[in-house]
Image: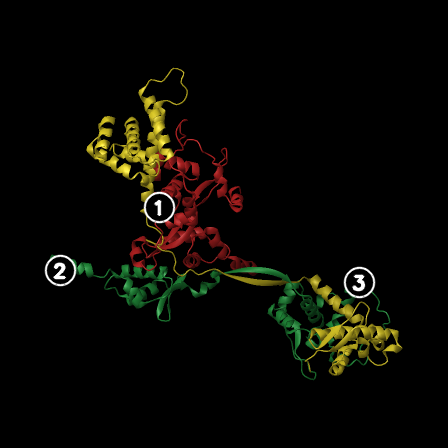
Chain colours: A yellow, B red, C green
């Protein structure tokens, strides 16, 4: 049944061969397989079996319109762009067939037809080129890159710099330190070094099971000399911080300016 | 005098045969094509990379591997006639859709080309997925924006594309000369009133450009 | 007859030159070194892999890459003497640490000098790393052992040191007086400093050996 109606449709539309009719029947069935109206037009144009430059745009327009008619009869839903193309081709057809109205604007039917022919030829050419491109030797299939590439190893090289000025300044620094040595010597009796404090703390630490104030750790006779007391307090405090850091002691102060208290760290017997 | 001679020797480039060996080692080690400049940077001072490449290329003529030019870069690849031996190395490539293949071909032959132009040639809209796939394969990349209203982005093919298809340059695409001579690569504007003739400078194009790439585009 | 000939041709191995090409391509493209058997399996029937490998190896003798045996397998690798091309050095300049420059300065001014002396002057111990770095930089080297108890090693500066700092000899270094005059040395008079107080009965000072050289440097 549908076969007959299709045949009738096309017979009335134009004189085309049985083979072309078959093609168009299959076109209708495969409409989803087309990539848009231009693709469909190209397929129809191929059925004209002529050089793409010599296709009859008028004939093509009729074939397309016939196709759309059949699709409608078969209740195949066509996407909007197929219908837009149909409307445009109908317009093109009228332009090609009827003489232009005097004073009419826009491109002539021939210009539009020529561009459509160009588009189809170009699409055809791109299809051919795509096929030739894919037919080329391909990397990873026909030829291959290095299987064991060796990466460039990035090495960091440190270059140390120093100028003669750096050298002299450094020496000056050490000599300056040296020059002040007598100063230390002359004051030695009033200075309690951190090393001395550390020694003393280490010997006392074993007995400091209970919390005791920092003062308890100061050396004998500290109260006699203010200078000495200052130095000894500072050194003992610094030494106790070292011992806390080393995990040997614990330190606390209940509030600001309250006595600083120390004791041996629980569980430490060293 | 002696000192001058010493300095000369110290800064003299190695003999050409040695330069050729070095370029050979560097090209062998890399799976990616390398530019002359990249090679030069790794060689001792004063080497003539171009000359070394020419003689190296000659040396490998007819061998199992060949020195090939890929765009402006150089690489060593196995001879195409021996591909059948490398079944184990063969990478199964994803079968590309017709849309992807055609879009790729259009970009290659028409580059730099915009999305609207691709759509004009194919007569259908180009799906985002198609462009994404080609970008992911590293076969296409963004070119400069077109200086037309809407400043649409353009697409061009990459060095990886040339490498993959064994092309020295886009000028070596099959049949490109004939296509150009017959005017099929011309950007012929559609006369008004044609379907799909508008749509140049689609606002959607903006989605496609990451900030970084934009920087590149306007360098 | 004809049929026999055809069979012979079909099963005949390719000429040796062709076999060599094939082995070359296979080794190039393979992601791992290959054994003879593996190579043979990929080649047309009747190929002599061992012979092809021998001639391929010979062909690459003296080239930038070499056909090498890795265990029982074969691979193409960068020629050993060109390994440096596969490394990119990034030179980072760094200032010498304060400890290092001071140690170096003391050695330069007091050479030959011992570690104990350096420590005495700097007032802190000299780390092993500092000495090692200076030795590595080839700015200091070992001098004669000191003829004192323990026979400690001494350090002196090298020619490389003199070159780097643009000195003819270590004696050209400006003396303390010059340093002070040029403002590099703090000119502050040390309060409470008594003449002759230096070196008085300090046990540590015994380490100090006032060599003639030292005297020279500061005259």
* 3D distance between C-alphas at marks 3 and 2: 106 Å
Question: Which residue is situated farthest in the top direction here?
Answer: A102
Q: Chain of mark 3?
A: C
Mark 1 Cα-neighbour bin, 10 Å: few <14, some 14–19, many ≥20: few
- Which SS class for mark 2? helix
CB under 8 Å between discs 1 and 2: no
Answer with mark 3 or mark 2, whichever residue precedes in sequence: 2
Going by the picture, which residue comes out furthest to the bottom? C149
* Callout in the foreground (1, 2): 1
* Residue B118 x %, y %: 40, 38
Q: Are marks 1 and 3 in contact (CB under 8 Å)?
A: no
Which residue position holds label 2? C4
Q: Give the residue at mark 1.
A: B97
Q: CA distance from mark 1 to mark 3?
A: 85 Å
Name the residue carrying label 3: C181
Q: Is residue B139 visible?
A: no
Q: Is residue B39 above or below residue A203?
A: above
A163 or C87, nearer to the observer? C87
Image quarter (top left, top right, bottom left or bottom right) of the C terminus of chain A: bottom right
């Amino acid at each position: 049944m549908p076969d007959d109606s299709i045949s009738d449709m096309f017979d009335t539309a134009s004189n085309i061969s049985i083979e072309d009719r078959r093609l168009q029947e299959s076109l209708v069935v495969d409409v989803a397989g087309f990539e848009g109206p231009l693709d469909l037009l190209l397929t129809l144009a191929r059925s004209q079996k002529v050089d793409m430059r010599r296709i009859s745009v008028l004939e093509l327009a009729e074939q397309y319109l016939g196709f759309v008619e059949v699709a409608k009869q078969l209740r195949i839903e066509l996407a909007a762009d197929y219908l837009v193309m149909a409307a445009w081709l109908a317009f093109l057809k009228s332009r090609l067939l009827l003489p232009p109205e005097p004073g009419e604007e826009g491109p002539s039917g021939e210009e539009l037809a020529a561009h459509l022919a160009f588009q189809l030829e170009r699409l055809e050419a791109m299809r051919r080129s795509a096929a030739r491109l894919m037919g080329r030797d391909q990397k990873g299939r026909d030829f291959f890159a290095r299987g064991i590439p060796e990466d460039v190893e990035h090495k960091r090289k440190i270059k140390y710099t120093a100028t003669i000025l750096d050298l002299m300044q450094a020496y000056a620094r050490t000599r300056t330190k040296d020059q002040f040595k007598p100063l230390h010597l002359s004051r030695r009796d009033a200075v309690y070094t951190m090393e001395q404090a550390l020694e003393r703390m280490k010997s006392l630490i074993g007995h400091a099971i209970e919390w005791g104030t920092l003062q308890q750790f100061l050396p004998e006779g500290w109260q006699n000399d203010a200078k000495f007391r200052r130095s000894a307090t500072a050194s003992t405090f610094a030494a106790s911080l070292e011992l806390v850091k080393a995990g040997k002691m614990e330190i606390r102060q209940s509030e600001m300016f309250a006595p600083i208290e120390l004791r041996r760290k629980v569980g430490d017997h060293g | 005098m002696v000192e001058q001679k010493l300095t000369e020797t110290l800064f003299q480039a190695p003999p050409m045969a040695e330069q050729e060996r070095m370029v050979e080692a560097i090209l062998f080690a890399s799976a990616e094509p390398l530019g002359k400049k990249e090679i030069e940077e790794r060689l001792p001072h004063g080497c003539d990379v171009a000359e070394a490449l020419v003689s190296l290329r000659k040396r490998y003529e007819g061998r199992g591997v060949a020195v090939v030019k890929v765009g402006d870069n150089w690489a060593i690849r196995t001879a195409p006639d021996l591909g059948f031996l490398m079944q184990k190395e063969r990478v199964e490539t994803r079968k590309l859709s017709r849309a992807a293949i055609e879009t790729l071909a259009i970009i290659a032959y028409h580059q730099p080309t915009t999305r609207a132009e691709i759509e004009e040639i194919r007569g259908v809209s180009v799906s985002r997925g198609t462009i994404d796939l080609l970008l992911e394969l590293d076969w296409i990349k963004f070119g400069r924006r077109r200086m037309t209203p809407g400043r649409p982005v353009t697409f061009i093919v990459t060095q990886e594309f040339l490498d993959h298809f064994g092309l020295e340059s886009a000028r070596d695409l099959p049949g490109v000369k004939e296509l150009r001579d017959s005017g099929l690569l011309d950007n012929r504007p559609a006369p008004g009133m044609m379907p799909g003739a508008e749509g140049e400078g689609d606002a959607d194009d903006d989605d496609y450009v990451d900030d970084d790439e934009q920087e590149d585009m306007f360098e």
